[in-house]
């Protein structure tokens, strides 16, 4: 959905580096979700945020992953010390409620 | 409990035919069942959705059939066209304790429509 903007579209990182993925929700939407899609799999929920608050992070890996949605600016998904298993497409979605509107994703490749 | 099983994994249908994709779920607390369409390099886009209080919903060539007792739902694409070639995901959600709709996705069906 063109309304949810994600960047970069493609990101290549070496093992051990940090990856920062950005998401600007649709205008007027204050809820942001992050999902991860591994090759040949469906999307898996990671985290749900509202402005300045993490509401539900039950799908986030316990280590190396963090997310924020500041008062001003985009939501950021941060992955520290990336490993090959982090290679995936990361999708952001926004909503006021249902339904969710997804961006075109960031494809992270860890070499 | 949170799993949504989708079949088939891939499907080839002739132009003009009917494409049928099936999903099954376990958690009876799910209360919203959307279908998403995804083209290569794009994010999933909502196609059609249903709540469990109805057994069928139709929008143009797309129909969801919902069987609450069997805990199954399916997507039917009538008069399938080459432009329908995409990956289709079923999903189910339950309003979580935090008030958000947390979608659980099936593993996807890669649909190819041949001339």
Image (cartoon, helix red, strand yellow):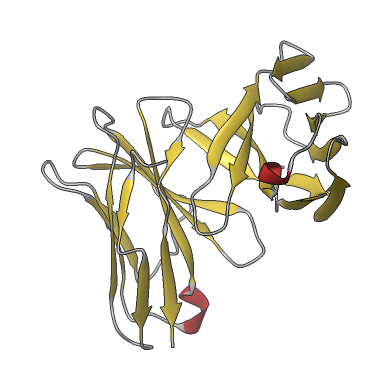
Q: Residue at x 34, y 87 (%)?
A: A16
Q: Position of residue A104 (x, y in %)?
A: 42, 52
**Is residue B32 in view?**
no
Looking at the image, residue B90 sits to the left or right of residue B45; the answer is right
A27 or B19, which is in the foreground? Answer: B19
Q: Position of residue B38 (x, y in %)?
A: 59, 48
Vertical side of A26 occupied by A39: above or below: below
Residue A3 in which image quadrant: top left
Q: Position of residue A64 (x, y in %)?
A: 35, 72
**Is residue A1 in view?**
yes
Quadrant of the rendering where the N terminus of chain A is positioned: top left
Q: Position of residue A21 (x, y in %)?
A: 30, 62
Residue A79 in which image quadrant: bottom left
Residue B54 in which image quadrant: top right
Q: Residue at x 47, y 30 (%)?
A: B97
Kindly give the residue lying farthest to the top in the view shown. Answer: B53
Kindly give the residue lying farthest to the front in the view shown. Answer: B115
Quadrant of the rendering where the C terminus of chain A is positioned: bottom left
Q: Residue at x 50, y 59 (%)?
A: B41
């Amino acid at each position: 959905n063109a309304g949810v903007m994600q960047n970069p579209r493609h990101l290549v990182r070496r093992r051990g580096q940090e990856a920062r993925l950005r998401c600007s929700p649709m205008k007027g939407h204050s809820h942001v979700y992050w999902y991860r899609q591994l090759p040949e799999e469906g999307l898996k929920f990671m985290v749900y945020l509202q402005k300045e608050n993490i509401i539900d992070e039950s799908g986030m890996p316990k280590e190396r992953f963090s997310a924020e949605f500041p008062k001003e600016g985009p939501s950021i998904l941060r992955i520290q010390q990336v490993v090959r298993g982090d290679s995936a497409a990361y999708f952001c979605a926004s909503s006021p409620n249902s339904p969710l509107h997804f961006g075109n994703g960031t494809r992270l490749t860890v070499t | 409990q949170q799993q949504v099983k989708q079949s088939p994994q891939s499907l080839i249908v002739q132009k003009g035919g009917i494409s049928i994709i099936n999903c099954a779920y376990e958690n009876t607390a799910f209360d919203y069942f959307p279908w998403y369409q995804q083209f290569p390099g794009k994010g999933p886009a909502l196609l059609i959705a249903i709540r469990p209080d109805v057994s069928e919903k139709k929008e143009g060539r797309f129909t969801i059939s919902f069987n609450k007792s069997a805990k199954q739902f399916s997507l039917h694409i009538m008069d399938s066209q080459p432009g329908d070639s995409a990956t289709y995901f079923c999903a189910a959600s339950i309003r979580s304790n935090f008030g958000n709709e947390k979608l659980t996705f099936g593993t996807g069906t890669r649909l190819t429509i041949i001339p």
